[in-house]
Image (cartoon, rainbow, N blue to C red):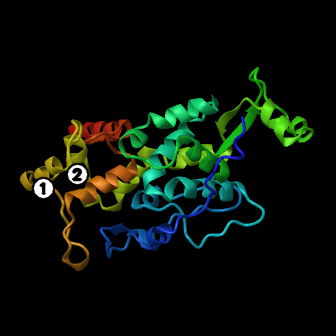
């Protein structure tokens, strides 16, 4: 199996990333509030201990400080930072990349991972331009996935054996690859878990919490955006703050934030994810016992 001759996307921060690193944007309007993304850039501390990242910053649409440069000698936290940047820096790919890391917490053959990506909601409904092959390679390049070459019998091929072969001989020997998450990839799965991102978003502005849950409850049934707009026109008590330049927060603000948090997904209409359902059920239990 020769993957060397296929065009592989190199791991790099896209040019649009700088925009998100500067501040939280909604239709090119920044919220001038103290805890907007401009003041909440995610940080992943180097050194001993587990990596830490601000899930709220991922929700706001970015993954890491654009000025951050990886050192020559990478610590565990540096490697996690690299994977988080890969997952979070491109909105269109974010959830599919995250789901791929989570899926590969158990080892899978390369084509199984490709098939998994091709069946994700994001790939089916959102017209992702990258191929599943390219997305796997992005995560491998970022250090979130490891690939082990396998022969026709499904046995791992040692690096020493490959080193003794010519390139053509090695290509003939490798039948496929086993794909599995790395330690940095597993930590990224934990850090960017939808429940963490959803709670981070809900905590940013506590007075909007009930509005977020109202949208989630409404989207327990698939909803097109005009239906969500109608909800905001007819339901009382929904928060529609006035922010920068007298801009009134519209329903698409809440849909966008819940989408980035992993609470809503587009399946031809907006619908609550499993993580969103769990958060909504917990909220209803809290209300019932309050």
Q: Earlier in the sequence, mark 2 or mark 1?
A: 2
| Disc 2 element | helix
Q: Nearer the viewer, residue 202 or 3?
A: 3
Q: Is residue 42 left or right of residue 27?
A: right
Residue beneath disc 1: 237
Please give the name of the residue rendered at 71% of the width and 60% of the height, measured from the top-left corner.
47
Q: Quadrant of the N terminus?
A: top right
Residue 111 position in % (x across, y down): 60, 31
Residue 165 position in % (x across, y down): 90, 38
Q: Residues within 10 Å of mark 1 (few under 14, many from 20)?
A: few
Residue 16 position in % (x across, y down): 47, 68
Please give the name of the residue rendered at 70% of the width and 47% of the height, measured from the top-left corner.
5
Q: Quadrant of the C terminus?
A: top left
Q: Nearer the viewer, residue 153 or 187?
A: 153
How far is disc 2 from disc 1 in space, using C-alphas? 9 Å
Please give the name of the residue rendered at 81% of the width and 30% of the height, measured from the top-left corner.
173
Q: Nearer the viewer, residue 200 or 184?
A: 184
Q: Nearer the viewer, residue 270 or 231?
A: 270
Q: Is residue 171 left or right of residue 226?
A: right
Q: Which mark is residue 210?
A: 2
Q: Is residue 199 visible?
A: no
Rendered view: 252 above or below 219: below
Please give the name of the residue rendered at 26% of the width and 51% of the height, measured from the top-left corner.
212
**Residues at circles 2 and 1 in contact by the CB criterion of under 8 Å:** yes
Residue 133 position in % (x across, y down): 58, 42
| Most distant residue in the right direction | 164
| Most distant residue in the left direction | 234
């Amino acid at each position: 199996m020769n993957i060397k001759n296929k065009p592989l996307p190199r791991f790099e921060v896209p040019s649009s990333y700088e925009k998100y690193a500067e501040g939280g944007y909604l239709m090119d309007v920044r919220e001038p509030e103290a805890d907007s993304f401009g003041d909440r850039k995610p940080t992943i501390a180097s050194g001993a201990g587990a990596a830490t990242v601000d899930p709220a910053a991922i929700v706001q649409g970015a993954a890491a400080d654009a000025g951050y440069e990886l050192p020559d000698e990478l610590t565990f936290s540096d490697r996690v930072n690299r994977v988080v940047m890969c997952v979070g820096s491109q909105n269109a790919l974010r959830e599919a990349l995250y789901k791929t890391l989570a899926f590969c917490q158990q080892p899978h053959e390369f084509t199984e991972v490709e098939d998994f990506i091709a069946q994700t909601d994001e790939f089916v409904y959102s017209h992702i331009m990258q191929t599943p092959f390219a997305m796997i390679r992005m995560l491998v390049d970022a250090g979130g996935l490891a690939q082990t070459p396998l022969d026709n019998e499904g046995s791992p091929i040692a690096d020493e054996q490959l080193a003794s072969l010519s390139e053509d001989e090695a290509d003939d020997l490798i039948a496929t690859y086993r794909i599995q998450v790395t330690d940095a990839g597993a930590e990224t799965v934990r850090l960017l878990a939808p429940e963490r991102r959803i709670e981070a978003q809900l905590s940013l502005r506590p007075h909007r919490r009930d509005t977020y849950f109202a949208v989630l409850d409404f989207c327990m049934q698939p909803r097109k955006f005009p239906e969500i707009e109608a909800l905001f026109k007819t339901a009382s008590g929904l928060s529609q703050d006035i922010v920068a330049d007298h801009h009134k927060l519209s329903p698409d603000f809440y849909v966008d934030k819940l989408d980035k948090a992993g609470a809503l997904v587009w399946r031809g209409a907006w619908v609550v994810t499993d993580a969103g359902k769990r958060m909504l059920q917990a909220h209803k239990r809290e209300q019932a016992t309050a």
